[in-house]
Image: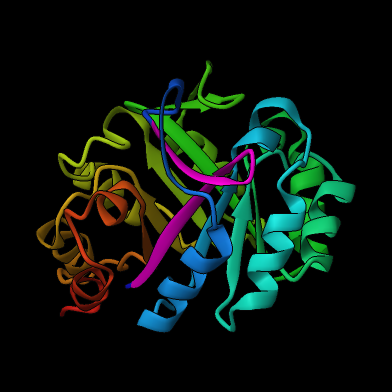
Amino acid sequence: MDLYPAIDLRGGQCVRLYQGDFAQETVYGDDPVAQARLFADAGAPWIHVVDLDAARTGEAVNRPVIAAIAAAVAVPIQTGGGVRNDDNALALLDAGVRRVVIGTAALEDPAWARSLADRYPGRVAIGLDVRGREVAVRGWVEGSGRLLADVAAEFDDAGFAALIVTQINVDGAGTGPDVDLYSELLDSVETEVIASGGVGSAEHLRTLASLGEDGSAPLAGAIVGKALYDGALTIDDALAAAHSE
């Protein structure tokens, strides 16, 4: 299972939100490029970058920072936040991002999402953020009225590089991921699944890495943010746990 250390950007700074709440923001640093280098130098196979400003307002104010991160490290960058049309996606790909993540726009315009995945094979992932089992949209503010299982099934044949599934209820809490959610999903889709939300310890990562030992598909990756910044988990320990058998 690949580890995806996360860098969430707001106003050019590294921040973390608690359960997506912009009123509960913690700033962890003002040099995202240096942070990316630390993750890359430690051996992270990917870095997950989220443009919170773009996700909230549609304004890609952090795009120069994202381009700088992509230029500074050799590992691939996966980036989401406010990717709502071809121009947004292509600007990020042209900036050196390996994979773009689309969320709300995929639910609002499935045909466009499928077209993007078809035109850029292996370079487009879909982000499905859930509260319980309901998919949330527009920066987690609104419920879509649709269940994760149904949305995942709808897009399973679309050729997305991965389904990135965040359980909002535990995001930023460090209390453990929603293992049942990922077990259910891995049993029902063929697209690779990346878990996000709730990881607060190496044991949590080992549990996620063990999914699939019963013969079902394993998780392709896990995104970790707050635990790395708070010191609850070192990047070395996280990498070792993600690769544990």
Residue at point 55% right, 80% down?
Answer: 75
Image position of 140 with respect to 198: above or below: above
| Residue 11 colored in magenta in the image | yes
Q: Residue 81, located in which quarter of the rendered image? A: top right
Where are the magenta residues, as a range?
A: 2-17
Residue at point 63% right, 76% down?
Answer: 72
Q: In this image, 151 relative to 92: left or right? A: left
The N terminus, quarter of image = bottom left
Q: In this image, 219 relative to 10: left or right? A: left
Image coords of residue 114 (percent x, y)? 75, 51
Residue at point 75% right, 52% down?
Answer: 63
| Residue 172 colored in magenta in the image | no
Image coords of residue 39 (percent x, y)? 42, 72
Query: What is the magenta segment's predominant secondary structure?
Result: strand
Q: Residue 95, located in which quarter of the rendered image? A: bottom right
Between 112 and 235, the one lying in front of the other is 235
Image position of 42 with respect to 143: above or below: below
Q: In this image, 175 relative to 101: left or right? A: left
Q: Hey, which residue is sitting farthest left in the picture?
A: 203
User: Can you see residue 122?
Assistant: no
Between 99 and 150, the one lying in front of the other is 99
The C terminus, quarter of image = bottom left
Between 163 and 84, the one lying in front of the other is 84
Q: How is the image coloured?
A: rainbow
Q: In this image, 94 relative to 142: left or right? A: right
Image coords of residue 149 (percent x, y)? 43, 38
